[in-house]
Image: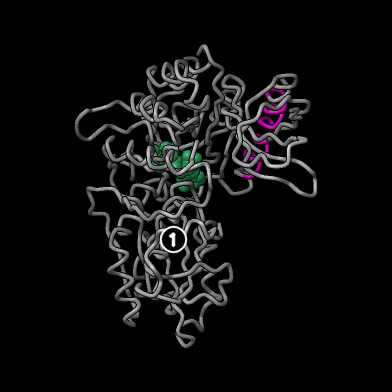
Amino acid sequence: MLVDVPLAALAGLPRAESAPASGRTFYLETFGCQMNVHDSEKVAGVLLARGYRPTTDPERADLVLYNTCSIREKAAQKVFTHLGKFKKAPEQNRSVAVLGCVAEQEGERIFDRAPWVSLVCGSASYRRLPELLDRLEAGERRVTGLGLDVDETFETDVTRRDHPFRAYVTIIEGCDKHCTFCVVPSTRGPERSRASGPILAEVARLAAAGYTEVQFLGQTVDSWRDPGPPGLRFSQLLLAAAQVPGIRRVRFTTSHPRDFGPDIVRAIEDCPAICEHVHLPVQSGSTRVLERMRRRYTREEYLETISLIRSARRPISLTTDIIVGFPGETEDDFALTLDLLERAGYDGVFAFKYSPRPNTPALEWSDQVPEPEKSRRLALLLERQRQIQIERNRKMIGQTLEVLVDGRHEARGQWTGRTSSNRVVNFTSPATDLLGQYTQVAISQAGPNSLVGEHTL
Ligand code: SAH
Ligand code: F3S
């Protein structure tokens, strides 16, 4: 993601003349999940308020920042490839910063590997950014914000959002589940929920600023518990956000199957503004593998949860994450995962080959699955899922769906947007400006990953 700030977004920020970094520019690139994308919006807000100006050219920026992901090895490696381009930064009086999960995971070792980097900061330390930037600007060469000893969430009133009508809102940070393959608990720290008061106040501010869709974010978003009075449940928070005047859609991701209850399905059934989509990572269809992954549910329990979702009065779209080739995964275990695909009828699947990660128990296990076998399983799974999605999306042909329009393909003469179920719809329309509008689109064609339709006035 390139931070490209519309001028309107700068209104109301402190005047550059009075800010410490007046005239300096920054380039910020983000890897990984929506949490990282939203963290970058917060970091960009802090930099803008300090007088930095954004640039899309990393070669010319005074401060280059990479907000990094370490969920799989490839993602982490990519960062070092990018960093390699900035060896001369110190002699050019430019600074390079590594933020996010690789920063937290590798810590000061990043300075050994890339000595031209001068700031390393994990997400749990972003609240200290102003102080860390002071030190960086004063010429300090190895500034760090590391450690996970936090009991609060990072909130800022200067967040600079990338999107004009859809906004991310963090409601819970970190994770306490400690799945045996996952780096998140060691890179993002313990689970901590924000109180409902500040969350709903943020939603109200967003609505007043013209946002109509909010997306609640958390690694395990449905584990959210109101830390103080009024002690809302997660489903009650969804309902409360949906009632904020001006808010037309409330999304949430990612749900953990263990914490997903019938009250969430009831909230979706009862309240049209809560989006009819649940992302519920299963990881594997085999209870034996799930136990070794420490996922805290069985295949049967997961199937019960999805039958609850599937039997809702409102059709709810269901997506998932799957890992193939987890240590010890046999052909029979994998067959159970393929079988689960059929039973669940997912509307979308993010599938990954298991990647051994530092500071996780599964890294040490001796029964690793060979790489070619992981690739074979991944290809089989993706092909099966592609067919399932084609079949499911075809059922949408002939329906008229509400789409929040978020883009335009000039060359194809098409608008693009998303349904409440999070399907991508590309469509034609005689209208000239639809960005940010909710339009009714008649669906005429369906592919595995998107729908095509027409909007008639
Ligand atoms: N909080 C989410 C997942 C966060 S990571 C949850 O509760 O499931 C996003 C996805 O990356 C995971 O769902 C998992 O499918 C995948 N993933 C995490 N660690 C991985 C690893 N070591 N190798 C391969 N995929 C991994
Ligand atoms: Fe990772 Fe498991 Fe938490 S996948 S984010 S440790 S629920």
Magenta span has 386? yes
Q: Residue at x 37, y 21 (%)?
A: 261
Q: Where in the figure is residue 95, as x and y percent of width and height?
A: 44, 77
In the image, is 387 to the left or to the right of 118? right
Residue sticking out furthest to the right? 412
Q: Where in the figure is residue 406, as x and y percent of width and height?
A: 62, 42
| Residue 103 versus residue 161 in the image, above or below | below
Which region is colored magenta? 375-392
Q: Which residue is mark 1?
A: 44
* SS under mark 1: helix
Q: Residue at x 55, y 30 (%)?
A: 319
Q: Amino acid at mark 1?
A: Ala
Kindly tell me whether residue 367 is visible in this rendering.
no
Q: Residue at x 74, y 25 (%)?
A: 443
Q: Where in the figure is residue 118, as x and y percent of width and height?
A: 39, 76
In the image, is 169 to the left or to the right of 320? left
Quadrant for the C terminus in the image: top right
Q: Which one is nearer the viewer's eye here, 348 or 169?
A: 169
What's the magenta bit mostly, secondary-structure-wise?
helix
Q: Residue at x 61, y 28 (%)?
A: 347
Q: Which one is nearer the viewer's eye here, 447 or 189?
A: 447
Q: Quadrant of residue 44?
A: bottom left
In the image, is 10 to the left or to the right of 432? left
| Residue 271 versus residue 123 in the image, above or below | above
Residue sticking out furthest to the left? 229
